[in-house]
Image: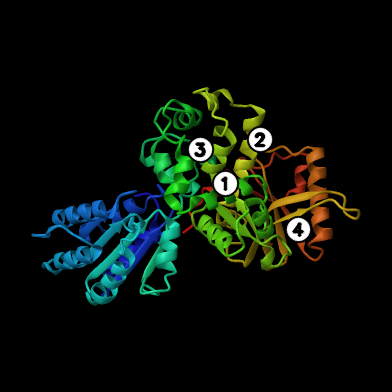
Amino acid sequence: MTGRHAERRLLLESIQREEPQFVAIYGRRRVGKTYLVRQTLSEAFAFEHVGMASASLSDQLLHFRDSLLRNGLRDCPPLASWHDAFLALERLLDQPRPGRNVVFLDELPWLDTPRSRFLPELEHFWNARASLRKNLVLVVCGSASSWMVSNLVRNRGGLHNRLTRQILLRPFTLRECADYAAARGLVLSPRDVCSAYMALGGVPWYWSLLEKGLSVAQNLDALFFAEGAPLAPEHDALFASLFRHSEHHRRIVDALAAVGIGADRATLLARTGLPDNGVLSRCLEELEQCGFVRQYTPYGKAKKGALWQLLDPLVLFHRKFLASRPRDERFWTHSLGSGAQNAWSGLAFERVCLAHVPQIKQALQIAGVLVHVASWRHLPDAVHPHGTQIDLLLDRADRVVNVCEMKWSAGPYAIDKVTADNFRAKLETFRAVAAPRRTLHLTLVTPDGVLPNAHSSIVQSQVTLDDLFADIR
């Protein structure tokens, strides 16, 4: 199994404890939640059931009964309610079975159909019965992160503080994607992996669709632009599967897609038309938990000045290249080297870097230093006429700020006089406006490092693509 070392350790610790355990695992669609549980705990399964999408209460109960019979319940009459279903599950658990008994309920939010009283019955099952069984481990999963967070992680009713562990399963890093591709027999260079990551992100299922013997460009054509391309409809399916009332989340994503470096709360309220009654905050939190957006505080601002920025590679790729529905089935291959693709690659590489800040810190040997991660933007004014945007600042406790410039290039990055002058102007503006008492180190993050020349001495430190592939545990 690729990666997931910390998550596997948490699950194994749960079945080693002597007390009953209630574990919730959530994360975006296709990120590998079910695979993680089955690979780690299947030998201890006493019961496994997967909820059905868009099914009625009667269909959910019918299939729950099938799962009870398949998992060894000797007799089970038809189920009329979730009360009946959990009583039947208790009878199954009463049957002698050595060791820990793992009950795995997958796609739990789908079981909570309207007026089904599923959640109250789950609460009663845990509080009145399951929590008294010392050998029981209840593991629940769900891609509908909004439901999982609202009803389990932050439950204010009968399940308040009942979870013994919660695991937010995040997408793979570059290193994990490289390991996963290699395990599947794909031959990809680090640059190939990064190029694919720019469009796919780190969602394992997307990577499982890559075909051996095809280049990254050919694979992206097959996944997004060919007839029947499997990821062409994924953008819309993502929101419907993750969020109830997903139209709110889509309006937020629409607004963020138009503002690059990010937007604050007031801007999002104006652009989305959402009411200022907690809906925006809840949706932003859910988008952040699923990895679609990041929240950050601009350098020198208070927390109330937080911005949100859209980061999800697949969503951004889809909106850039598939919104117009190109009819060329080899659109990506035919676009290689074009201005549009080169411009996109530069922005996409920046997002890859923002998803790998721990690796950048390790490469700079500041992993053990207290670091505030921020961005900064200055609009031209009469005193400082140079408009400036810095997407990644590492403000260190030792009073040094790494001003990170992230540049995608075909080889070692060559700094010419114009580029060096632009870097100096950016540093001078940032120092004068925001950081007069800090030491500023210009840091270049680029695949193959900086080409030594007459202007390269302006760079104080470098981070390469190999550094971004470091294994951080």
Distance between mark 4 and mark 2 Cα atoms: 27 Å
* Element carrying mark 4: strand
Residue 334: percent from the left, percent from the top? 56, 22
How many other residues sit within 10 Å of disc 3, few (<14), some (14-19) or many (≥20)?
A: many
Q: Is residue 311 visible?
A: no
For mark 3, what is the residue? 196
Q: Does the image show residue 459?
A: yes
Do the residues under discs 3 and 1 have CB atoms within 8 angstroms? no
Q: Which residue is mark 2?
A: 343
Provide residue 62's location: percent of width, then percent of height: 20, 53
- Give the amino acid at mark 4: Leu
- Outermost residue on the left side: it is 74
Pick out the residue farthest to the right: 382
Q: Which residue is mark 1?
A: 352
Marks 4 and 1, how far apart at CA: 23 Å
Q: Nearer the viewer, residue 464 or 49?
A: 49
Q: Can you say whether 353 is above or below 396 in the image?
A: above
> Which badge, 3 or 1, comes first in the chain's sequence?
3
- Determine crowd level at label 4: few under 14, some 14-19, many 20+ residues with C-alpha closer than 10 A: many
Q: Which residue is mark 4?
A: 440
Local secondary structure at mark 2: helix
Q: Amino acid at mark 3?
A: Ala
